Amino acid sequence: MKGGKGIWKERILTMAAILILAGTGMTWLGNITVPGMQTLREPENSARKAVGEALVQDSPESQTFLAMDTVISMEIYGDHKEEAVKKSVDQINSLEALWSVTREGSQVYELNHHQGSPVKVSKETAELISFALEMERETEGALNPALYPIVKAWGFTTREYQIPDKQKLQRLLEHTDFQKLQIEEGTVTLPEQMEIDFGAIAKGYTGDLVVETMKKYGITSGIVNLGGNVALIGNAPDGKPWRTGIRSPYGEGTIGVLEAGDCHIITSGGYERYFTGEDGTVYWHILNPETGCPADSGIISATIVGTEGKRCDALSTAVFVMGLEKAEAYWRTHEGIEMILVTEDNQIYLTEGLDGRFALNEMSQGIPVHVIKK
Ligand code: FAD
Ligand code: MG
């Protein structure tokens, strides 16, 4: 069990891990939840001190480590927190071994290297793929895990960035009909020349599986942050909702704070992985499956809040591709999710379920906030 000093030690370790990642150019931070903290920038206040005292009474089991090319951190409260955290870390490492697109021997690697032949997959992989097929349909193709050859062509996997020519993109787009993938009884067959990558949904699904594990250990309060994909278990230990800083698309730090508990908060933004071409244009890693080019929908940050991590992750990417109008239409016809969207003309759109729970921080005051109603 770690006391108050332990918490700060973990936070220092987190910062060290972030600095290491920043130095290697890996993705590092998105949304961040800290018990009782207003935002990363605000000074301590009396509420913070009161929560600080509560933390000393029931201090969390904390863990920070690198996996899935990002910093993963946990702060877990409850009687079996040590075992719960240990099991969850093992689980995340095992899921990475299944779903890494680059790691030789992973199930995704096997699928990408045996097109046309059936490959046996685990229950988790089969579920991930079935869910991805469902979401590809539901988002009318805005989410498409079969873009991997195009992601590679832009250099987003190797960070040797380049602008592929139109003919190459057209050629590659011919093999991205994800619905042609066949799945039956734990066996998956990719069509010739298709390559898949679950970077847009696997961290969200990992969040679901970790929360399930935590709940098996009786955990009722905790944060699991998978590189900015935040999974919140219950409320903060003081019984109040967690306060999560939503990553700013304008630079480092957060744009505002969302009060919420027992949910996933997942943001997609162009800032995670991008390069500036010789033409001065910024090219980011979220692609429009129709063109093979970076999505240019007018949305620069899409946050989805809901009870299913895999759905929030899939939709954060899909909504970034769809743009405001389609995103609003999707929200009106689907239950169980809320959104915070930032557009390139510097407006924030909030769905009504989050009204009164999201507050802009000091630096973002002045940005117009519009509430989208059903
Ligand atoms: P999201 O918006 O959630 O996803 C964007 C990513 O999805 C893009 O980077 C691209 O890969 C893909 N994509 C782009 N457009 C679409 C679209 N329209 N539909 C569907 N998918 C799309 N990165 C490394 O550099 N090295 C690694 O070894 C590595 N290992 C990983 C292992 C695992 C198990 C996972 C889950 C991720 C790993 N990553 C690795 C990171 C990964 O490649 C992505 O960068 C990351 O998942 C993007 O997440 P995001 O939240 O920033 O963006
Ligand atoms: Mg996503």
Image: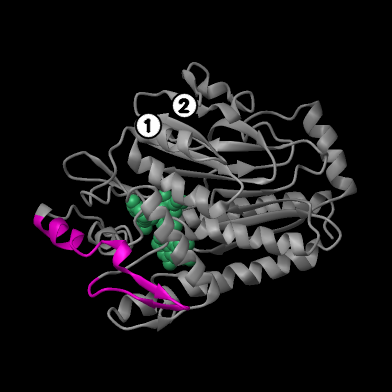
Q: Viewer-proximal residue, 172 or 190?
A: 190
**Is residue 258 visible in the rendered structure shown here?**
yes
Q: Quadrant of ligand 1?
A: bottom left
| Residue 78: percent from left, percent from top | 83, 56
Say what amino acid the circle numbered 1 marks: Leu
State the residue at coordinates (75%, 55%).
Answer: 76
Vertical side of 355 occupied by 179: above or below: below
Label 1 secondary element = helix
Mark pair 2, 1: CA separation: 9 Å
| Residue 284: percent from left, percent from top | 31, 46
Q: Coloring scheme of the render? A: one colour
Vertical side of 259 occupied by 190: above or below: below
Q: Viewer-proximal residue, 24 or 57?
A: 57
Query: Marks 2 and 1: CB-CB under 8 Å?
Result: yes
Label 2 secondary element = strand
Q: Quadrant of residue 319?
A: top left
Read off the residue under disc 1: 324
Range of residues picked out in magenta: 167-193
Mark 2 residue crowding within 10 angstroms, few (<14) / some (14–19) / many (20+): some
Report the side of 319 relative to 64 (left or right).
Answer: left
| Residue 220: percent from left, percent from top | 79, 52
The tag earlier along the polypeptide, 2 or 1, is 1
Vertical side of 351 occupied by 76: above or below: below
Say what amino acid the circle numbered 2 marks: Tyr
As drawn, the label of residue 349 is 2
State the residue at coordinates (67%, 58%).
Answer: 211
Report the side of 265 relative to 62 (left or right).
Answer: left
Mark 1 residue crowding within 10 angstroms, few (<14) / some (14–19) / many (20+): some
State the residue at coordinates (57%, 74%).
Answer: 94
